[in-house]
Image (cartoon, rainbow, N blue to C red):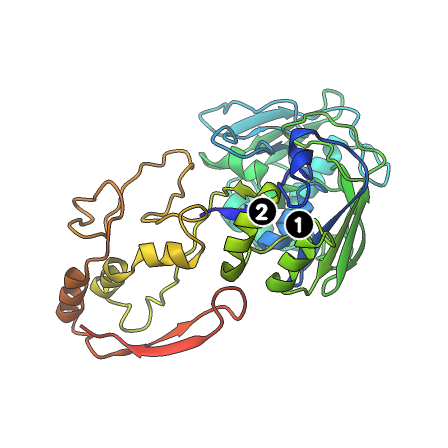
């Protein structure tokens, strides 16, 4: 799936400043419009895309993904650490050296003690990925059971003289480096309270700091006066001196505001009824940004009829992915998806099991069209024909209703 985003904020393409991409300049204020409200500013707790979008230039992890688009934005690269470690001891040990001379936005020098404390805080503060991403660290099991007494003493060893951090795992984790790059592994001052910080942003090491925030109305960023660029690809300095975010404006009004020069970037996708206008009259302010994501429908496999594998397969055969692409804005901004790995992900191979003339055992090279005959056959075989299902859709964006309908052949 692609997003239409009409100025580089160090990590993001935006509208109304197309020339800034070609001839970057610093200074001024970047004005961003967002229709939905933001959540907690705690980087180890927040788990919505919007908040992560805003936290990227504020917080850093030991490793990170390159801050540019394209196939070269893989794999992880050093960030606060000087090196991407090679696994030792059959994948149970990872050694990193912390960069010197980096300061938090409150002026405090970053140390290995802050790194160790930050990983303990992931468990103590109840980060949603503490178990899924960091349970391989020795001592993590105890931390998950008793967060108040989490030490990770066996799992994380630091050497202040050598400025090194060594992770010891209880079992190999082939994705451990990627987990070190995930935003919940943001490094914070050791003094950061071990609870959700809510509307208060902890100090970070990135080029910006959040200085004012109301989750329903606005957010303000200013430069971190202690920041210096240590790696342009890992954490670029950014162009604007200030960033002003306004919450609550609907996408239709946001498009008009950007067109009139009242704002520079809208976070949400351009509405379908404005794509033609934007593409024809304001093409110079538009950039196509391709994130590694896809849109999907979640099925409740604990309730009939989706307890049946055949019904789930029938739905996949019946979905008209071409219509979905059109609904999302056309082939310039969307493409059919037939698998869990988005295009561009390492290991991705183009194939489609649920299209006319294909099957999970004999997939086609790509999606072609729905196979309604196969879908009806599977529903008939499942014995669920005539059952009613409830479809719940988001209240905003392109979907704004709840539908009730039967499973039919």
Q: Position of residue 387 (x, y in %)?
A: 25, 79
Residue drawn at point x = 74 percent, y = 37 percent: 206
Can you tell which quarter of the image residue 386 is in?
bottom left
Q: Give x and y (percent) for residue 139.
A: 57, 42
Count of numbered badges drawn on the protein: 2
Foreground pick, 230 / 29: 29
| Residue 111 horizontal side relative to residue 364, left or right | right
Q: Is residue 67 above or below residue 38?
A: above
Binning the other alpha carbons within 10 Å of mark 2 as few (below 14), some (14 to 19) or many (20 upward) gives many
Q: Are marks 2 and 1 in contact (CB under 8 Å)?
A: yes
Which of the labelled discs sits on residue 138, or is there none? none
| Closer to the camera in the image, 62 or 277 | 277
Residue 276 image position (x, y, % from top left): 50, 54
In three-dimensional space, the C-alpha distance between marks 2 and 1, rounded to whole angstroms, equals 7 Å
Q: Nearer the viewer, residue 170 or 206?
A: 206
Q: Quadrant of residue 76?
A: top right
- Residue, disc 1: 265
From this view, report whether residue 136 is shown above or below residue 22. below
**Image position of 386 with respect to 101: above or below:** below
For the point 70% across and 57% down, the residue is 196
In this rendering, would 131 be left or right of 127?
left
* Residue that protrudes farthest toward the front in the picture: 281
Residue 127, can we see it? no
Residue 303, position in %: x, y? 32, 73
Disc number for residue 5:
2
For numbered disc 1, what is the local secondary structure?
strand
Name which residue lies at 43% across and 76% down. 402
């Amino acid at each position: 799936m692609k997003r239409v985003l009409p100025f580089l904020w160090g990590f993001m393409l935006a509208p109304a400043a197309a020339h800034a991409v070609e001839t970057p300049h610093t200074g001024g204020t970047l004005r961003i419009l967002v229709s939905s409200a933001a959540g907690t500013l705690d980087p180890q707790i927040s788990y919505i895309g919007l908040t992560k979008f805003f936290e990227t230039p504020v917080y850093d992890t030991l490793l990170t993904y390159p801050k540019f688009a394209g196939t070269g934005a893989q794999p992880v690269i050093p960030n606060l650490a000087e090196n991407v470690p090679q696994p030792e001891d059959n994948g149970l040990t990872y050694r990193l050296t912390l960069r010197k001379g980096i300061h938090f936005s409150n002026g405090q020098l970053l140390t290995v003690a802050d790194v160790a404390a930050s990983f303990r805080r992931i468990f103590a503060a109840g980060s949603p990925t503490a178990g899924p991403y960091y349970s391989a660290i020795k001592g993590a099991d105890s931390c998950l059971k008793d967060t108040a007494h989490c030490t990770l003493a066996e799992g994380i060893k630091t050497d202040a003289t050598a400025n090194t951090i060594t992770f010891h795992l209880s079992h190999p984790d082939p994705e451990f480096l990627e987990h070190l790059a995930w935003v919940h592994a943001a490094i914070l001052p050791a003094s950061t309270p071990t609870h959700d910080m809510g509307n208060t942003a902890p100090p970070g090491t990135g080029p910006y700091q959040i200085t004012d925030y109301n989750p329903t109305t606005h957010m303000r960023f200013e430069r971190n006066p202690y920041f210096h660029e240590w790696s342009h690809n890992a954490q670029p300095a950014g162009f604007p001196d200030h960033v002003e975010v306004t919450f609550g404006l609907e996408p239709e009004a946001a498009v008009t505001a950007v067109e009139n020069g009242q704002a520079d970037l809208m976070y949400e996708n351009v509405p379908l009824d404005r794509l033609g206008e934007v593409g024809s009259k304001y093409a110079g302010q538009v950039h196509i940004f391709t994130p590694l994501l896809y849109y999907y429908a979640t099925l409740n496999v604990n309730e009939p009829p989706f307890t049946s594998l055949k019904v789930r397969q029938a739905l996949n055969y019946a979905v008209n992915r071409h219509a979905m692409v059109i609904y999302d804005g056309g082939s310039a901004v969307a493409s059919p998806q037939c698998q869990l790995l988005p295009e561009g992900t390492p290991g991705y191979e183009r194939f489609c099991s649920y299209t006319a003339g294909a099957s999970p055992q004999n997939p086609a090279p790509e999606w072609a069209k729905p196979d309604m005959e196969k879908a009806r056959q599977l529903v008939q075989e499942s014995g669920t024909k005539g059952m009613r299902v409830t479809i719940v859709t988001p209240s905003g964006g392109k979907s704004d209703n709840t539908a009730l309908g039967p499973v039919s052949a």
